[in-house]
């Protein structure tokens, strides 16, 4: 007789990057999670290793960057291109991997083996009371709706366990972070679509080498008459080599083609001539076939979801797999949170697939283009110089040629800053159901773009005069981020007061989702004193010294750790009176309101005006997000 | 019958900041240490808490900054001054605590309780195989010279232990880091000299408060008609209040005057009116008398040394105690290391007292001045504005008045960047025994000053294109740091080749101290491939792309991780062709050689010329350090 079936908010299968990020977020926000993995231990060696600049922002926003950096990862700032020369390979050029025209806090790729990264998440999950159950696997599941609150039944079993080591649980959600070979995807009958019919067999080797090759600590693509290799530096004196072993375009193509460690090393030695290379130690070696595939669907019922490698596979060359997985999970986490907090209707969950599948498609298209770029002519130093060393943002248009444009687009993509979600109810656009002349539009009245990440800016925190990174000041807390760029206080005090008044008015988007325990919230609470769904920050275009938090309207003053002075110089907008306002493309005197989604992507940007209209427009926007009328009489919808 | 007496390189008494830093360094460099502390556990709460900007540089150089920051300390960027007003206290002004005219990487004070800082060192010591023996105390010692190698006999006993829990050991050195009440100092009969006859009784309270005082997260000095307080923010939502309870200038002065927790809180409430303050939790509370004292001697025999609070006590207001202790230990550590490595004669050890006692005297003088500044009129906003907001280095002279000069001098001192050792054999000056027109002198031909810290500079590491902090690239390894600023390679290739040739010539200062195992050193060794006493770094005034490490002379190329391109813009020398060269005041085309002591202080700066003369001058300089003739026929001495 089965005991009482245990209920969970979510069952997560697989503790790779996508499952761990989902678990980390939901564990912090108080959900009851069953998280299993079929491996007895976290990844011990090898696998993914590249954390892109945008992902490092995200890890910092989770408060986990320091833990990652404690492992002293390698950092890739530049990519070197080596090509066949008269006496073996020779360097053709080097490129910045995240050039200056991208406004990145961390313009480098961080290299660390996946297991160390996994451990950082696992420790955080455990700190918050969760755990990964190992080695357990999923044996069946069904969205049978027998319990309307926990509609999904999931069967689990210990890997190699006794007949009794089985469990049946019920859950609101089931998530597959199983990787490319997914039981759940197979059971659902979701097909992988192969974008590029060409498949490849790759060899990958992590180890410690002795070599006179000068760029062994750089990322390199090496083309020689003996074949091609990609070099990626690693933590702990290691280097990773990727070696393409076979392609489906080869005459004797065999997807099961393999190569021994020694064969690959000999291959590498031949390619790297006139330089020598010897292995002192090999930590990991693997050969695996890779095709470019994308899952047709990420969910069928908005109860059973998939993400990460389960949904998209591609070559490892651009180091995108783990990074895409991070953002899949981040995207899904807050949407589940908002639906389960009764903030948003269930239909919000449909945007997980529509947003993330687009990114995977872009990734596959990029992967194809990237591969092609490699096989084309190498650019000259002059062409790259313009793109790589520009100090003050984008070079002028006439300096650009076709190649540089392609290169730039690629850098933005590979750094993670190219992610751009399409217009929908979350990402405002001129085709959004809510319209108002107060919405500011790229590029005319703001440099911010809905569906894109918030532009970074350095400001002074008023309460303690610390110089801080504005975009990092609100942690990953599942809340919408409302940035009130308040312009020049002597000009906007009325507009700010009106905004604050409407914000706290009955049925406003802000007031409607007040915490039930609002009266008993600790005065130490920094981010969610009034609502779990919003965090408010005020940025004044004034010197810190001149700002008294107590003189702000109480709803803004309550967020005393999130009041900032826009008084720090920024080399990208030299001479600006208020650099953060300027970078956002907002009026330095009049400000504006920037609505940022819980995942850091811009939702909309609204003009700050006197009277209730700014808040009314937001009532309309959030009315669309939450699927009901907000703002009472004043509602726009 | 006593068992065989165990021999140690050093016995360290006390595991506060000074003892721990000494232990950390010597443990890393392979010394055999007996380190005891009479407390059963590290500091649990309270005590020192301020890490000054310069000390944070040092912690980073030890590779321990990340561990300190993991505790999320408070950071003080500004100091607010509160004075009596019509309705209670009011803010008069705020000042940057480390203003822009100081070229600091970390322009803030880091606040964290001493116990957490101690634990960071203890973990490092344990990682390197050492440990602190607790609770043990010293009961006797004698430099009896019975064993010429281990001349000091030390008796130790367990605190509250059995009669059998005693130990007698012999050591090369004995160090007292016992704090103000030192058994060793007393036994040696070394007197404390009281610079300022005025003594004070202070109360200090760490706790979590609820208050509407707006600057509770800032460092504040509050003067009110009801008395004075200093506010220091802390980690973990805490705040520290310092309250002066009595002074020897009071009519009813009593050095044993005390006050209860409640009395001090009531006192604080009265002072802070019209603001309210309530304590939610008090973590630590203490009342203690403090006088300004300095030990007459730091050592009598250069075998038994003292440092830290054992040698200097003063008010805690400026947060200097722990920072001075750090640098006492750092100064002594490398000198012991060099004597014990047979690099330098025993006389090097005399510079510990001469250098560090001067700093303690400066500290006491500063402490007296600082206290006086507090009781004087408060400056106007205009006066401070000039000093606090200057963006591009020092304001022009005519903007400065007496007060600002005093303030600036104080900021430099409190931030730790004011430490300036006097000329001696280590710190070259025009009165140094070795003279040559090739020595560069401040301010005419270099901005560097012997006896002062190396100026920070950002450069590109050639081997992996990482943008790095030059001054941090050589860790605390006990070695002299030779920075070859090589200027424009097309102009200096001959001078660089000549320098390298002379460096490796027989009997050169560099060659004379070659490692015995030089043939078997791993190719992974980054810092000491040739000698444990020198680390060499080359900085070329050229874009990274244009530099091939293999084209440098082999002795320089061997340090492949320490070859840098001086190609990063610096806002302090905007427009410079080679910002690092420029900041050091070196010729951007012709370069120069900067010799930095193992503790990061400049030793001398020498012109880079063709022929052997640059190296000859260094042979002369190091000849003075090591006390013998170097450089064979070419020697200058």
Image: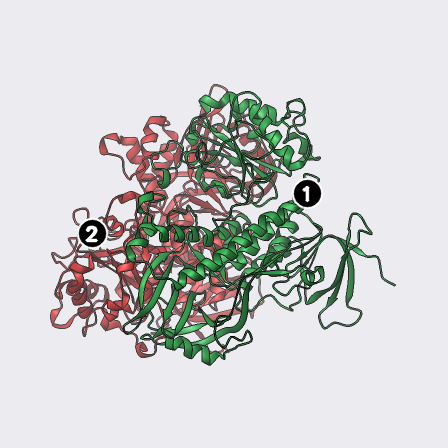
Chain colours: A green, B red
* Distance Cα–Cα, label 1 vs label 2: 65 Å
Tag 2 subunit = B
Q: Position of residue A55 (x, y in %)?
A: 51, 52
Crowd tier of the residue under label 1, counting other residues whose Cα lies within 10 Å: few below 14, some 14–19, many 20 or above: some
Q: To which residue does mark 2 refer?
A: B586
From this viewpoint, is residue B395 visible?
yes
Relative side of A300 to B356, left or right: right
Q: Quadrant of the C terminus of chain A?
A: top right
Relative side of B519 to A473, left or right: left
Tag 1 subunit = A
Vertical placement of residue B577 versus B271, above or below: below
Considering depth in this image, is A604 or B456 the residue closer to the camera?
A604
Vertical placement of residue A92 versus A151, above or below: below
Relative side of A506 to B108, left or right: right
From this viewpoint, is residue B189 visible?
no
Considering depth in this image, is A296 or A582 the residue closer to the camera?
A296
Q: To which residue does mark 1 refer?
A: A347
Judged from this view, the residue extending furthest toward the top is B86
Judged from this view, the residue extending furthest toward the right is A1
Q: Position of residue B607 (x, y in %)?
A: 16, 57
Query: Are callouts 1 and 2 both on one chain?
Result: no
């Amino acid at each position: 007789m089965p005991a009482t079936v245990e209920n969970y908010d979510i069952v997560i299968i697989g503790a790779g990057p996508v499952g761990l990020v989902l678990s980390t977020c939901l564990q912090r926000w108080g959900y009851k999670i069953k998280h299993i993995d079929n491996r007895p231990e976290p990844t011990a060696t090898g696998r993914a290793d590249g954390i892109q600049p945008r992902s490092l922002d995200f890890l910092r926003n989770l408060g986990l960057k320091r833990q990652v950096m404690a492992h002293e990862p390698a950092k890739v700032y530049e990519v070197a291109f080596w090509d066949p020369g008269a006496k073996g390979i020779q360097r053709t050029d080097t490129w910045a991997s995240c050039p200056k025209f991208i406004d990145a806090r961390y313009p480098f790729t961080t290299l660390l083996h996946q297991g160390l990264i996994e451990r950082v998440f696992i420790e955080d999950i455990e700190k918050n009371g969760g755990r990964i159950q190992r080695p357990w696997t999923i044996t069946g599941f069904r969205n049978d709706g027998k319990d309307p609150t926990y509609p999904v039944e999931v069967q689990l079993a210990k890997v190699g366990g006794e007949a009794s080591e089985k469990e049946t649980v019920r859950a609101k959600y089931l998530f597959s972070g199983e990787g490319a070979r997914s039981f759940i995807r197979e059971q659902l009958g979701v097909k992988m679509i192969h974008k590029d019919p060409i498949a490849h067999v790759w060899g990958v080797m992590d180890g410690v080498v002795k070599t006179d090759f000068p760029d062994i600590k750089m990322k390199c693509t090496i083309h020689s008459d003996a074949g091609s290799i990609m070099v990626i530096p690693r933590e702990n004196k290691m280097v990773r080599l990727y070696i393409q072993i076979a392609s489906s375009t080869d005459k004797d193509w065999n997807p099961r083609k393999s190569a021994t460690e020694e064969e690959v090393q000999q291959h590498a030695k031949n390619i790297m001539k006139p330089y020598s290379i010897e292995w002192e130690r090999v930590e990991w070696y693997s050969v695996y076939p890779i095709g470019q595939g994308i899952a047709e669907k990420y969910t069928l019922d908005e109860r059973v979801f998939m993400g990460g490698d389960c949904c998209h596979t591609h070559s490892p060359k651009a180091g995108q797999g783990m990074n895409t997985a991070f953002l899949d999970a981040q995207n899904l986490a807050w949407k589940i949170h908002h639906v389960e907090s009764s903030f948003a209707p269930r239909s919000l969950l449909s945007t997980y697939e529509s947003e993330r599948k687009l990114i995977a498609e872009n990734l596959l298209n990029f992967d194809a283009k990237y591969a092609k770029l490699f096989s084309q002519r190498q650019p000259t130093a002059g062409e790259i110089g313009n793109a790589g060393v520009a100090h003050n943002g984008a070079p002028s248009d006439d300096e650009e040629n076709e190649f540089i444009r392609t290169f730039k687009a690629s850098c933005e993509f590979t750094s993670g800053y190219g992610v751009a979600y399409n217009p929908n109810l979350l990402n405002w656009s001129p085709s959004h159901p809510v319209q108002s002349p107060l919405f500011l539009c790229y590029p005319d009245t703001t440099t911010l773009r809905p569906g894109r990440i918030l532009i970074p800016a350095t400001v002074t925190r008023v309460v303690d005069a610390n110089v801080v990174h504005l975009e990092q000041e609100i942690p990953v807390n599942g809340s919408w981020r409302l940035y009130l760029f308040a312009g020049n206080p002597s000009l906007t005090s009325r507009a700010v007061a009106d905004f604050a008044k409407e914000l706290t008015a009955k049925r406003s988007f802000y007031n409607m989702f007040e915490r039930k325990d609002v009266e008993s919230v600790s005065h130490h609470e920094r981010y969610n004193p009034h609502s779990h769904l919003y965090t408010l920050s005020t940025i004044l275009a004034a010197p810190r010294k001149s700002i008294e938090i107590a003189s702000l309207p109480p709803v803004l003053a309550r967020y005393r750790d999130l009041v900032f002075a826009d008084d720090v110089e920024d080399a990208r907008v030299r001479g600006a009176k208020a650099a953060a306002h300027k970078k956002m493309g907002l009026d330095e005197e009049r400000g504006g309101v920037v609505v940022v989604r819980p995942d850091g992507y811009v939702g909309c940007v609204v003009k700050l005006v006197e009277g209730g209209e700014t808040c009314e427009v937001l009532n309309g926007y959030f009315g669309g997000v939450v699927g009901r009328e907000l703002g009472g009489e004043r509602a726009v919808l």
